[in-house]
Image: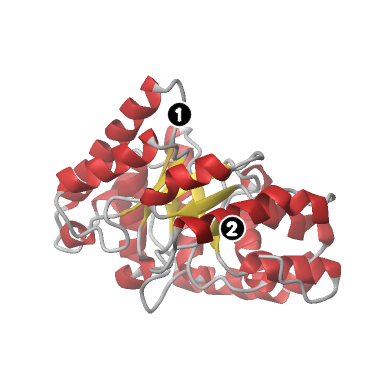
């Protein structure tokens, strides 16, 4: 099936993409600067998604963010702290500075459960303070060619979190994870990108970090091209979030450069670009401070 590719007149050009990624890789050293590294830092969703996370360990991470500017006053804060949904209230209670609460939800990372369960989990997460909700595309439907079921699930999650947020007088953002390492083909990644954007995603995200292949420059490039095409057709700006396997400052620069190249500088802010990271923060700090930093 290629209904979205036809609708938006898009076909991944792997040869052109390969050339572009080679140029990006060759230019990373020239891109590296204190300002760019700090921009990357400000767009991080600082993440802990461990089986052994506890209220105490999550609070410890939040307190490090709270105290960060005392040690690094010239640095921006991360955009958000990302946790499992049952820790939304923990982050909210401990938060003492300006960053968002992101949760993974709707039966992350597999998305294999009843829709009613997924919706209830999202509802509770927003009730307890989540500002942003990251869900996984229903690959069980999508890979079977049942695009409508996959899209309807996103629409229902969108309606659910909007309803709860409206009662609180606020807005909540929805990120949809495509799990590109399981989609594999650029055409499928593109179809999933358009489906998620049409169904109500504020961001499309590469990966959960829980499968063998996570974020890759090639998948990111295709997703960014789809965001550009969707913006061309609709006027809507959709955000992009690479996640999973991003472990170094150089990795961050690579994705920053892809977004800059394909989408332009107007996407280089935390409203439209995020990194899902657990290890990159220290690497970026170390690159700028020119010493090994293990703050986080």
- Residue at 49% over, 63% down: 243
List x then y, in percent, for residue 46: 57, 57
- Residue at 78% over, 49% down: 69
Which mark, residue 171?
A: 1
- Residue at 65% over, 42% down: 266
Q: Nearer the viewer, residue 203 or 101?
A: 101
Question: Element at badge 2?
Answer: helix
Question: Element at badge 1?
Answer: loop
Numbered marks: total: 2
Q: Nearer the viewer, residue 79 or 149?
A: 79
Where does label 2 land, which residue? 60
List x then y, in percent, for residue 189: 35, 62
Q: Nearer the viewer, residue 56 or 32?
A: 56
Q: Residues within 10 Å of mark 1 (few under 14, many from 20)?
A: some
List x then y, in percent, for residue 135: 34, 51
List x then y, in percent, for residue 33: 82, 63
Q: Is residue 60 above or below residue 126?
A: below
**216 displayed left or right of 136:** right
- Residue at 61% over, 47% down: 79
């Amino acid at each position: 099936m290629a209904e979205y590719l036809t609708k938006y007149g898009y076909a991944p050009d792997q040869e052109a993409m390969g050339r572009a990624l080679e140029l990006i890789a060759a230019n990373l050293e020239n891109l590296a600067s204190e300002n760019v590294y700090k921009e990357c830092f400000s767009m991080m969703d600082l993440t802990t998604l461990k089986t052994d996370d506890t209220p105490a360990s999550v609070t410890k991470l939040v307190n490090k963010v709270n105290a960060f500017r005392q040690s690094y006053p010239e640095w921006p804060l991360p955009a958000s702290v990302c946790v499992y949904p049952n820790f939304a209230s923990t982050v909210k209670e401990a938060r003492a500075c300006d960053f968002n609460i992101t949760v993974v939800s709707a039966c992350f990372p597999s998305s294999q459960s009843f829709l009613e369960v997924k919706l209830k989990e999202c509802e509770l997460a927003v009730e307890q303070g989540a500002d942003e909700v990251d869900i996984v595309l229903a690959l069980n439907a999508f890979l079977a060619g049942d695009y409508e079921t996959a899209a309807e699930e996103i629409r229902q999650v969108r309606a659910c979190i909007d309803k709860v947020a409206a009662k609180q007088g606020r807005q909540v953002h929805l990120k949809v994870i495509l799990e590109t390492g399981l989609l594999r083909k650029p055409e499928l990644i593109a179809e999933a990108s358009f489906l998620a954007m049409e169904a109500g995603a504020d961001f499309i995200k590469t990966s959960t970090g829980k499968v063998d292949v996570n974020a890759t420059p090639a998948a990111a490039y295709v997703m960014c091209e789809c965001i550009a095409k969707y913006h061309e057709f609709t006027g809507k700006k959709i955000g992009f979030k690479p996640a999973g396997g991003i472990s170094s400052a150089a990795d961050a620069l690579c994705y920053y450069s892809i977004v800059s190249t394909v989408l332009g500088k107007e996407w280089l802010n935390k409203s439209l670009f995020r990194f899902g990271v657990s290890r990159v923060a220290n690497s970026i700090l170390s690159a700028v401070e020119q010493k090994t930093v293990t703050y986080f």
